Image (cartoon, coloured by chain):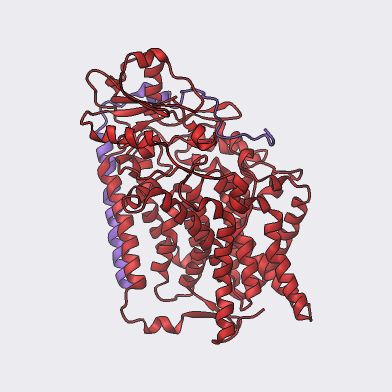
Amino acid sequence: MAKLVGVLTSVLAGLAVAIAAGVGLTAAGNPDANVDLKNNIGANNVYNDIDYGTRSAGR
Amino acid sequence: MRNSGPNGAGSLHRMVLPICSVGIALLALAPVLPGGFVLHYDMVFTPRQPLLPDVIGVSSALPRSVPADAVLALATTIIPGDVLQKLILFGVFVAAPLGAGRLVPTMSTGTRLVAAVAYGWTPYVAERLFIGHWPYLIAYACLPWIVAFGLALRRGEPRALPKLVLAIAPAVLTPSGGVIACLVALAASGIRRAPVVGGVAAVLNAPWLVPSLLRGGDALSSPDAVAAFAARGENWAGPVVSVLGLGGLWNADVVPASRAVPLVPVFTLALVVLALLGQRVLASRIGVTPARSLLALGAAGVLLALLGTLPYGAYLLRWLVEAVPGAGLLRDGQKWVALWAVPFALGLALAIEQAARYLRVRWQRVALFAVAAVAPFVLLPDLAFAGFGRLEPVRYPDDWRIVTERLADDPREGDVVALPFASYRAFAWNDHRPMHDPAPRFLPRGVVIGDTLYVDGAPIPGEDPRAEQIRRTLATDGDLGAVGVGWVLVEHGTPGDVEPALLDRLTPEYRGEWLSLYRVPGDIGRPQQFTPPLVPVSLAHGVAALLIGSSLLVAYCPWPRGRDRLSATSEVEGVKWPSS
């Protein structure tokens, strides 16, 4: 049990470092971040007549 | 119907449950087990999924299929994709009933069989299979095992924690499955173990949590999805009864026809009442606190599933998905009803066992158990034989292999755009079944597809900024090379138009019956970075894998196990049942 707690503690510490590194990298990187694109996320509307599904039974 | 001692009859009794579980799997899947791929809605497997950064979540899209894609990419390096798909589906259909049957605290084989069938043959399983949500099915199959090891951890049994980790691990292939599994683990293991189990949950879910947190765009979803993906009434009784009966998926196209039979709600309510009556017996055998915790979690699952259909629930959900990053997880609410499945199956089986005690004649008791075990098949016959032809295995046309080789051999940079620019296809070679575009899981390069979903023709905007960038470029006849696109793949034999003027500007590389490949002329730019950074995302996968690997060692390595033998079974209220 003590071993497992040790492993878990190490793993959690590693995860914390990973997240911290990621936050740092994200803050420093992505110079091309395009605010306009972000604001319009998901505006594409190309319909190829295939529905993901329907709520109407017996269609 | 009781287990006998360690003699021939006892061995036979012990074999009944595994045999029943394999029988359920064969009954459901027999027609699709021969070669070929089952390609239906979101279930898309490919012969060998490429190991690209996308599979671990280093992508502009939300990590909805992380780490499932990473696991598939690794697994298909040694197992062909179609074989792997069948192994997964068959494993799910065996593990779910087997886990529920082993979990129920009883010495009665009949009770185990009732629990097994009540858990393994449900509308939830049918609907999620037919919409292709195989990772949810894996999570569902893991839940009884998670409860078993969670209860063992609560009792302080040795090596219960690593076994719990191993039971949770398959369920965290997708974010929703991971959350469901960890909630069940927390409820089963109790408040005293919550810090440890919470830590385990965080690490196992890190592969999708980290890329979600570090993603370039936000993780907000369209509120339009709330109404479209809300639980749906499958018959005259409305969504509440449908959900209580473990059904109610939003998409009518994948719901078995038997769910609309007028008597189904009546039987559903009867089974729910029995399941609730059985909770008292369950509490007397596993303890009041864990039984209440599991029941409360089940009730919360039903409530979450119905939230989008309740008067103020829909408003709350719309606000959440629009304002809280990651709350899009809540929009397909019916998936949360999996939380109700375990207490439902255990309660029902134990209620039948109690009822059998009032019967003095053995054949009457056997008949009662038999009727209870057969009832789920009678109420949902159209899950059998893969929905009687709803699912069928097919082969990918050879064009896919040829295009894959062309792209792998070409040293030029650039992503692929798949046209028509949409998420779903209905190929003639797959009998026009709707299926997610296989290109991102087939081709050895980054593939951009449209990510808008349509429900009854109404659009639900996607969240991928890269898809939006490409859509704009296509719509304005812009330079695809400038946005990092080196290739255009046109998929034939599926609805949707492709602008001929666009293709005129490209260089044809391959023309087949089902696929055409074009090269974008000129210089190919570097794609705009919408992706989370590779290093922390890789680390998250690494630590999760490390935890699973170390748990495997601790749980099953052959070092001294004297204490384990002492508690190989647990005794509650005079009833012994296996703890693992």
> Does any portion of residue B301 appear in the rendered image?
no
Measuring from the top left, give residue B104's x and y in whole percent: 59, 70
Height in image: B350 above or below B378?
below
Dividing the picture into quadrants, the one containing residue B474 is: top left
Q: How many marks?
A: 0
Measuring from the top left, give residue B289's x and y in whole percent: 58, 68
Q: Colour of chain A?
A: purple
**Residue at point 64%, 77% (across, down):** B108
In the displayed structure image, the side of residue B215 where residue B85 appears, left or right: right
In the displayed structure image, the side of residue B343 where residue A3 appears, left or right: left
Height in image: B139 above or below B104?
above
Dividing the picture into quadrants, the one containing residue B403 is: top left
**Residue at point 47%, 50% (across, down):** B135
In the rendered image, the quadrant that contains the N terminus of chain B is bottom right
Q: Nearer the viewer, residue B322 or B177?
A: B177
In the displayed structure image, the side of residue B93 where residue B74 appears, left or right: left
Measuring from the top left, give residue B489's x and y in whole percent: 37, 27
Q: Which chain is red?
A: B
**Residue at point 30%, 35% (across, down):** B445
Q: Nearer the viewer, residue B392 or A12?
A: B392
Measuring from the top left, give residue B531's x and y in whole percent: 32, 35
> Does any portion of residue B242 appear in the rendered image?
yes
Height in image: B501 above or below B82?
above
**Residue at point 72%, 55% (across, down):** B268
Q: Nearer the viewer, residue B318 or B91?
A: B91
